Image (cartoon, helix red, strand yellow):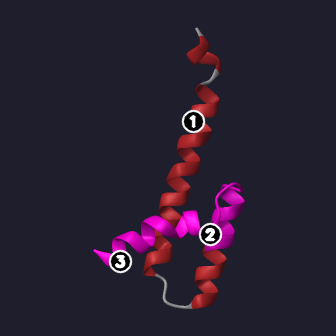
Amino acid sequence: MGAFTKGWIIRKRRTRREKIDLLRKRYAAVRSEAERDAIIQKAQKVSPQITSEQFLAPVQGSKKS
């Protein structure tokens, strides 16, 4: 029974994660610093609790490989 009332929370979390993943892909493809700063600001609007270091960690990890 509890899962029904929490469905909207799970949906919002999944949507937020998808948006952050999309922004990370865009960040990896962008070359200019101004566009990168804009993408980080958008990510922080989508998910205010995320820091720039947390946002960049998966992107920087994929560049090392």
Q: Secondary structure at mark 2?
A: helix
What residue appears at the point 57 percent right and 33 percent down from the top-left corner? 10
Q: Amino acid at mark 2?
A: Ser
Pointer 1: what residue? Answer: 11
Q: Amino acid at mark 3?
A: Lys
Residue 50 x %, y %:
64, 58
N-term mark: 1 or 3: 1
The answer to whether residue 49 is left or right of residue 17 is right
Asked whether 62 falls inside the magenta stretch, the response is: yes
The answer to whether residue 45 is left or right of residue 62 is right
Q: Who is closer to the viewer here, 62 or 18?
A: 62
Range of magenta residues: 40-65
The N terminus lies in quadrant: top right
Q: Secondary structure at mark 1?
A: helix
Tell me if mark 3 has few (under 14), some (14-19) or many (20+) residues whose alpha carbon lies within 10 angstroms of its own.
few
Residue projecting furthest to the left: 65
Pointer 2: what residue? Answer: 52
The answer to whether residue 46 is left or right of residue 27 is right
Foreground label between 1 and 2: 2
Residue projecting furthest to the top: 1
> Which numbered circle lies on residue 63?
3
Residue 48 x %, y %:
71, 56
